Image (cartoon, rainbow, N blue to C red):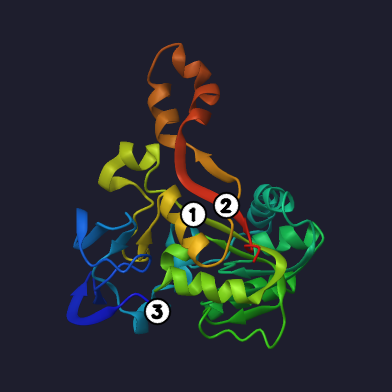
Amino acid sequence: MASVNTEPAMIDGVPVEAVARCALCGESSADQTLHIGGWRIEFCAGCGLGRTNPRAAEHKVAQLYDPKYFTAKDSGEPPSDYEAERAIRHQAKRVRHLRKVVTSGRLLEIGPGFGFFCEAAKRGGFEVEALEISEWAAEQARRRYGLTVHAGTVDDFDPRGKTYDVVAMFHVLEHVSDPLACLKRIQSWLNPQGAAVIEVPNCASDDARGEGLNWRGWQPRYHFWHFKPETLCEVLRRAGFEPGEMRFARSEYVRHQLKKIPVVGLFRSCVDCFYRGDWMRVVAPVAKE
């Protein structure tokens, strides 16, 4: 478990606590530090996993995820039916990636927000339910799609003997207090032939390098951990998974830079696929004993 010491301090109006050790390897020292506003991001000297330190205090985390967090332009208003249907069609890409490893069965999504991926997976033949920290977001998903959405965290949730074929986490692992403990708990809910599908920001991406401190993937107010491909794979292995094919977003930063170059900009859609963008996604089956 990541060891945490309480600090009587606030950053941007948020109570914070210090992180004493890396959640992956237990190392306390860092070999690189970034400062973003009043926040500090450190990279572990032992394994390279990034950590926000200090970070939002654990007992205040749920309060960070109010309706404005989930909505466009902080409106606090759920998306329209048109916007929701577009989002579901977009989520079908994630379902297709998942189906290369698990084609059907019982699926649990952690952090579904408005439930767009769950709805896409349900249309793809999966039996779905979800776990959401925000009761407000959970109620939106229940009301619009009739989904079974449990309110709470991974630590709170009791599957009551139920097992799953898939557990999905899209841009959630970076928010949890201890990613290794979280993944071990999830692994215990899966069938032996089951798999986790994990998507997180890629802090080793071309977008992160190109945009520096302005990269939208940092978000230290909300993101406690910052993954590179190798640290994501390592935390999955230590939790009892076998990381499979990893997919990466195309680089929006490179695409934007190419637009500035005459003639070359016309071919940007053929070039940006060779550069890594904001996120990475991996489907990781349960490791065979």
Residue at left 51%, top 79%? Answer: 153
User: Quick check: 206 left or right of 270?
Assistant: left
Q: Nearer the viewer, mark 1 or mark 2?
A: 1
Q: Which of 70 and 42 is in front in this view?
A: 42
Numbered label attached to residue 63? 3
Which residue is situated farthest in the top direction here? 263
- Gap in angstroms between the C-alphas marked 1 and 2: 9 Å
Q: Which of 239 and 104 is in front in this view?
A: 239
The quadrant the N terminus occupies is: bottom left
Residue at left 61%, top 86%? Answer: 158
Q: Position of residue 137 (x, y in %)?
A: 56, 73
Q: Position of residue 8 (x, y in %)?
A: 17, 83
- Gap in angstroms between the C-alphas marked 2 and 3: 29 Å
Residue designated by label 2: 282
User: Quick check: 125 left or right of 285?
Assistant: right
Residue designated by label 1: 233
Q: Is mark 2 on a helix, strand or loop?
A: strand
Q: Is mark 3 on a helix, strand or loop?
A: helix
In the image, what residue type sits under mark 3? Gln
In the image, what residue type sits under mark 2? Val
Q: Where is residue 177 in the image (x, y as percent from the top left)?
A: 39, 74
